[in-house]
Image: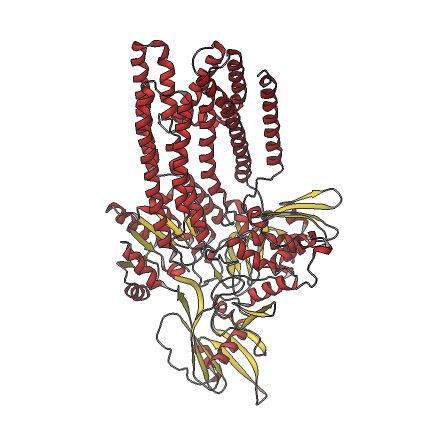
Amino acid sequence: MEIIFLLIPVAIILVAVAVYALHWSLKNGQFDDMDSPASKILFDDDDDLIPDDAKPKSKS
Amino acid sequence: MSVDCFHCSEPVPPDTNYQVKLDDQTYAVCCIGCQMVANTIIDQGLADYYRHRKLSQGSGPSLPANINITVTGISHWQAYDDSDVQSAFVRNRDNDEKETELVIDGLTCAACVWLLNQHVGKQPGVLHFNVNLTTQRAYVHWDATQIKLSQILAAIDTIGYQPSPYQASAAAQRKAKDKRQTILRLGIAGLGAAQVMMLSFGMYAGMAQGMALNYLHFIQWAALVIATPVVLYSATPFFRAAYRALKNRHLVMDVPVALAIGAAYIASIWATVMQTGEVYYDSVTMFTFLLLLGRFVETTARYHAGHAGNELDQLLPPVCERVMGKTIEQIAINKLVEGDLVRVLPGATIPADGVLEEGHSSINEAALTGEFMPINKGQGDILTAGTINVSSKLLMRVSKTQDDSRLQQILSMVQQAHGFRPKLSKSADQVAHYFVFAVLMIAATVYISWHYIDPQRAFWITLSVLVITCPCALSLAAPTSTAVATASLRRQGILMTREDSLEQIAKVDTIVFDKTGTLTTGAMSLQDTRALGDLSELDCRLLAARLEQESEHPISRAFRHLDGNAFSLTNIVNHPSQGISANWLAMPSKDSQQIRLGKPEFVAKGFQWLAPERPSGEGVWLLLGCEKQALAWLHITDAKRPHLNQVMQQLKTMGMELCILSGDHQDNIKELAIELDMDDWQAGQTPAQKLTYIQNKQSQGKTVLMIGDGINDAPVMAAADASLAMASGTDLSKASAPALLLRDHLGLISVLIKKARQTRRIMVQNLAWALLYNLVALPLAAMGLVPPWGAATGMSFSSLFVVLNATRLRRIKHDVQ
């Protein structure tokens, strides 16, 4: 069970990385608007992302 | 059968015929503004907006896309290209690039964000455009050589939103920083709690199965390392609040929380170092996380900016015309000084407080008083910044600069009223007071008793008592309920700017209504057309609409929804305070004749026939006439809001006492009060008298809800136990009321009261549960039967119950169309 002497410090380091990532994304303004992204993902506005051969033959 | 406008969801007025075509289908819209905007959206290939909007707003009643859409031309925005004006809010970057933030009025859901991003973001020269729905602001970064700011603003305007420059006040910037810090604290507490919990499970297993000491110590040290930033950073708000409260001799919920977290943390460090006793890192981190979560949920509801417009700058134009000797120059408003002479054209907003120096005009003071009839002003009269000059150009001598203006003073007063929390303490706070006292007493008793029985365990048992009774559930009971209720109300169109007023609204038994703007729409509307001559009613209306197109008088708004181009007229002359005359090429005779619209005497005298008798009925009766004869009476009045009778009946079945308090004349009020079956009505009231009336009711033990819209209602609304502002009300009244209707439907009042009562019930249930849990857990802890894992589990479970119970407030049971 000596492995926990390694694993637990590794876990602590990972938590520190996670906290830093949170801090960075806050500074980047990613938490400023928490309402519109929720509905935006449902919009059908990704036509330009569909590869050409997957598009329906006639565009209505 | 009434149809709703395809674009803005307001009812389509009868005999208008505006339409838009989309996908081979025709839809009705309510006015030319909506038609222009909808066509722009469809022509730009952005019709998906309407599909996305349905998706965003879900099955609930749809919020209007915009109230009163008017599309202004590009010339309106050109003032913003001026470098003086831009210096206030635009930042320059390298390579001729500029950036700024704009307040966008009219955003209701994510579809609006999508539409703006698509339309404005794709303009050539716009490098970055991002709309934030929560704060109702947009960030725009553009290349000044390719596109001008005025073009960007016009682009926003053509799809139906109103942009204005955003100047971050210090308070707003601090709020944004606070929010980020809160999220960071919450994140650290959450991550820390999860890690420590996992480590603690190892320790619990160790207690059950036996564990080698070196592993136990190692895990305890690891837990200490992770718990430290949680306590020293995430939990600091509690320590600060507890310190402040104790300094002021108040016992608030934060006191036992800070005590429990602090004592448990220090004791656990002692236990880790000295290798004796239990460690409570799991409870400490869990407390911090759950309590921070509760507070965050509470404050997020407040960040929802349901309406922009608290800033004074929103009310004033950016530039004005200053007269220097013979020349007139355009300057930014903030450059005006006392003594400057300013020219104000008809239709323009008065830029500063001052005295009328030359000219006569009528001034629309609706921004200040809500009164839509213009007031005549002559030389020597006082003019106020933010009001609108209606009929003629005038010269004004500035008497106060922007910072000293009357508008600014009122704004400061309103902001002060916000900070002042009178009399009432929330029931949760009262419970907290007794609870905290009881807990501290019990903890002390437990410590002393155990000291005699088994001194070694005394401290640890007291600690477990503090931890287990720590009011996690109690702290969460109120904030979660109000936050969920606030979100649910917002989906139905009611915005709570102060959630603690929900409690007051639940107790309301008397409702006081203002009349103009509240029970009535507050705007002129065409009620009736009575044809008197050879022309049909519809033709008379359309003729009048064409005549009124050139007028700035509020009465002309009653005709805005009609097609003003049905007839062509020449030589249109506006006779101030009298009426309008023009020449009309009447078919089929093809000879031009003069027509007049306005006061009966004006019309009749012009043609020298006798004016017919003015029909009875309040409001304004305009006469339309031509050389031969009188053509029609047009009745313009302030229309009542729809469904008033049903609304009042519904409120009465809920046990409400209803009254009208108005500054209007007695006859008008009496008629309305009797028709709506009001319990009481008072006419001709000054704001001071309204205040006295409400205070009388309050001294009789009643809880009063005041509903109004004008700025002069603001002190009355502050005195009432709760108040509600109309969506179409003045910005200042909206800023001073704790609750605000996003749709002007009075049926929402009963929705609000019912939800407030439901919230109160759920809060009481939560409090009762929290107390019950403590009553069971406390004796167990006092007897030394609760190990650390028991404390942590019990506390999590009770908090979970409280939160789940609060989510019952999400259901929308009483919907209003």
Q: Is residue B65 visible?
A: yes
Q: Tell me: B692 left or right of B738.
A: left
Query: In this view, which residue lies farthest toward the left?
Result: B700
Residue B442: quadrant of the picture: top left
Q: Tell me: B424 left or right of B200.
A: left
* Whole-percent x, y for residue B24 in the image: 60, 70
Q: Nearer the viewer, residue B778 or B614?
A: B778
The N terminus of chain B appears in which quarter of the rendering? bottom left
Q: Nearer the viewer, residue B504 or B398?
A: B504
The C terminus of chain B appears in which quarter of the rendering? bottom left
Query: In this view, which residue lies farthest toward the front?
Result: B209
Q: Is residue B247 visible?
A: no
Picture layout, residue B44 above or below residue B253: below
Give the colouring mode of the picture. Answer: secondary structure
* Whole-percent x, y for residue B481 in the image: 39, 41
Query: At 47% from the left edge and 32% from the top edge, which residue is drawn?
Result: B292
* Whole-percent x, y for residue B60 in the image: 46, 55
Picture layout, residue B287 above or below residue B764: above
* Whole-percent x, y for residue B53 in the image: 55, 56
Q: Nearer the viewer, residue B263 or B80?
A: B263
Picture layout, residue B388 above or below residue B557: above
Residue B604: quadrant of the picture: bottom left
Q: Tell me: B76 left or right of B260.
A: right
Picture layout, residue B543 above or below residue B757: below
Query: At 48% from the left edge and 30% from the top edge, which residue is drawn?
Result: B289
